[in-house]
Image: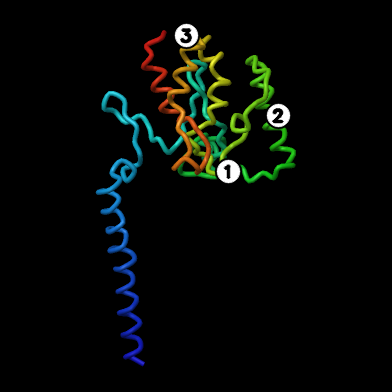
């Protein structure tokens, strides 16, 4: 009996050290050597200061910036901890809305988003990612169509020509991974940093 208990304890400690210490350190070490930027969180800097991560969206709301896709993440209400409130791009609460495609709440929210875009003067088809959330709620990217749709609003707010912004957006489009995986996309944080670098007032 004691012999079996000793073997069980040794195995437990061995696998705890192997899978809880050695393996994570080995993976972290390989990541640090081969993909240091990704291992550190794909941080984006401007003038040496960290302004965000290329992997997590930010809630840009100013008319002067390109907006990300909606986020379904929530946070605790500061005034009533028993309640939750919308907290876009809250990385501590990564989640989708979990609403089914025929759920009344989802249909109303999407229709409300479409109505807001129509008020901005968007007359054509609305890209799906402009009115729906991603499964994580943290998606940092939008489709090129979504970015191009926002050009008239940003151009008007900044006093920049639409052609200039169109060239900027097209220059920020990232293609499919390995030429076949995923869809073309635009990182909103990087696009907005490039927008600021235009120097337009």
CA gap between label 2 and label 3 equals 30 Å
Residue pictured at 53% horizontal, 27% vertical: 144
Labels 3 and 1: the sequence-earlier one: 1
Farthest bottom residue in view: 1
Give coordinates of residue 60: x percent, y percent.
48, 25
Residue pictured at 35% horizontal, 86% vertical: 5
Give coordinates of residue 115: x percent, y percent.
69, 22
Q: Is residue 110 above or below residue 120?
A: below
Rendered image: mark on residue 11: none
Rendered image: mark on residue 160: 3
CA gap between label 1 and label 2 equals 18 Å
Q: Is residue 130 left or right of residue 35?
A: right
Q: Is residue 171 above or below residue 100?
A: above
Residue pictured at 52% horizontal, 31% vertical: 142
Q: Is residue 155 above or below residue 24?
A: above
Q: Is residue 76 visible?
A: no
Q: Secondary structure at mark 3?
A: loop
Q: Is residue 6 left or right of residue 83?
A: left
Q: Quadrant of the N terminus?
A: bottom left
The residue that disc 2 covers is 111
Give coordinates of residue 135: x percent, y percent.
56, 43
Q: Secondary structure at mark 2?
A: helix
Residue pictured at 63% horizontal, 32% vertical: 128
Q: Secondary structure at mark 1?
A: loop
Q: Quadrant of the C terminus?
A: top left
Mark 3, mark 1: which one is toward the viewer?
Answer: 3
Labels 2 and 3: the sequence-earlier one: 2
Callouts 1 and 2 close, C-beta under 8 Å: no
Viewer-closest of 45 and 168: 168
The residue that disc 1 covers is 96
């Amino acid at each position: 009996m004691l012999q079996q208990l000793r073997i069980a304890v040794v195995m437990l400690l061995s696998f705890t050290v192997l899978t809880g210490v050695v393996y994570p350190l080995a993976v972290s070490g390989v990541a640090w050597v081969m993909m240091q930027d990704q291992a550190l969180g794909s941080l984006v800097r401007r003038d040496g200061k960290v302004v965000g991560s290329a992997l997590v969206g930010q809630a840009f709301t100013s008319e002067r910036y390109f907006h990300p896709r909606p986020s379904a993440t929530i946070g605790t209400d500061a005034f009533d901890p028993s309640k939750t409130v919308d907290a876009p791009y809250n990385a501590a609460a990564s989640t989708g809305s979990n609403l089914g495609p025929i759920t009344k709440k989802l249909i109303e929210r999407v229709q409300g988003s479409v109505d807001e875009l129509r008020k901005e003067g968007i007359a054509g088809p609305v890209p799906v990612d402009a009115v729906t959330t991603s499964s994580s709620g943290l998606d940092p990217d939008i489709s090129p169509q979504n970015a191009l749709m926002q050009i008239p609003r940003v151009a008007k707010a900044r006093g920049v020509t639409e052609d200039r912004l169109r060239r900027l957006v097209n220059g920020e489009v990232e293609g499919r991974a390995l030429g076949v995986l995923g869809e073309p996309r635009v990182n909103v944080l990087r696009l907005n940093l490039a927008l600021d670098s235009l120097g337009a007032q």
